[in-house]
Amino acid sequence: MIIKKKIFYKKRIDHLLFVLLIFGFTTHINAFTYFQEDTVNYNEYNGYILDKETNRPLISVTITVDNTNISTITNDEGEFLLKVPKDMASGKIVISHLGYLDKIIPLSDFGEKKLKIKLDVSITELGEVNIGPKDPEALIRAVLKKKGTNYINDNTIMTAFYRETIKKRRTYVSLSEAVVDVYKNPYESPKTDVIKLFKARKSADYKKLDTLTLKLQGGPTSTLYIDVMKNPEILFTENMTDTYIFTFDKSTKINNKDIYVLKFKQRSHIKEPLYFGKLYIDSETLAMTKAIYSLNMEDKEEVSRMFVRKKPRNAKVQPTQASYNIDYRQKNGKWYYGYGRIDLTVKINWKKKLFNSVYKLNVEMAITDWKKNIDNQTIKPKDRLKSSVVISDEASGFSDPKFWGEYNVIEPEKSIESAIRKIQRQLRKLN
């Protein structure tokens, strides 16, 4: 019986985590030319989202054009750029973030300079949980039971922006970005969501990779799989209460709604690497609005086997951190996948070398627009992005600043902008 459980845990984790690849040395940078259309049918709105009291930039804040599905999020510096069709110039944006009061801003408030928008902290105290005598296990079971009611159960086609980066300590050595179409199945459907790559670009400075090419397998499919309400086998199984301990944390607000916060961690007798984190649950509908969780890294050898597919014999590769973040958004009373992020830190120790190498890998995907798939359009198998894809192998170079055109993207941080400028200088030298 113990052996069966162990196999089950390992299978469940292997399906969740994208895989780290280490191959032989390469030194090329691809480049291409992209021709921007002369007619621009959108306006750009640029700003910062800050905490009103501390002026601290707020990360992963959702900015949505009111009464539409057009949206974006802030980057790690609190900055955003939103592209809106010109015929919506008289509209408004809705800004929402966990623990803060929603804010509505007319698009007419934006000018030539970046608009600074400050959010007020939301203070709330919720009463006792009403579904039982302070029973967190009953709460999470109620969340799963109401999945069909709370989440979109239509076929949808979503436009999403995806970015993955690899940094050696503080320096970017690889950067890939893509716009993809996500054909998402209803939340109660057992069918797997599929992705079609629309356009992508990449760069890599392999000279900083210790004569190795370090790549990620999975790409956008990994950020889709962490949708724990679509793929509950990640955390929520029939025997989840035998595996995890659930407890209540201090409540909060999101979208001006009261939110229960449920903490979880694996039980002490479970030795396989599982997860710990927090689940954010709407107190009225019992819909999960957000999940933040990390992998238990205590069993270093098992964690390494989970992540590493190939490596040189003279290197020991050890993941030291793996964390996951999933945000849901609401439209007409139904919740849907809005943003997913995975962060991984890897340490490489070399035989006969005094110093090790530390890499930080990040992947994130934000839904920027979506519509119901009324005609049940499908993607041909040959056009589907496979879960084994290495997105940087599918992309071209960074040669045009207007590459994305009208598509909304996550605004790059200053460090990424600096890396892109450096790449462009290298391309000019090559040409």
Image (tube, rainbow, N blue to C red):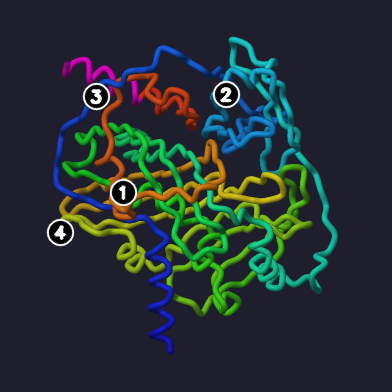
**Residue at (66% x, 67% y) in the render:** 140
Looking at the picture, which amino acid does disc 4 mark?
A: Arg
Looking at the picture, which amino acid does disc 1 mark?
A: Leu
- Sequence-first tag of 1 and 3: 3
Q: Nearer the viewer, mark 2 or mark 1?
A: 2
Return the residue at label 3: 32
SS at badge 4: loop
- Sequence-first tag of 2 and 1: 2
Residues packed near mark 1 inside 10 Å, few (<14), some (14 to 19) or many (20 plus): many
Residues packed near mark 3 inside 10 Å, few (<14), some (14 to 19) or many (20 plus): few
- Sequence-first tag of 4 and 1: 1
Left or right of residue 102, residue 63 in this image: left
Return the residue at label 2: 84
Residues packed near mark 2 inside 10 Å, few (<14), some (14 to 19) or many (20 plus): many
Disc marking residue 95: none
Return the residue at label 4: 313
- Sequence-first tag of 4 and 2: 2
Distance from disc 4 to disc 2, alpha carbons, whole Å, reads: 52 Å
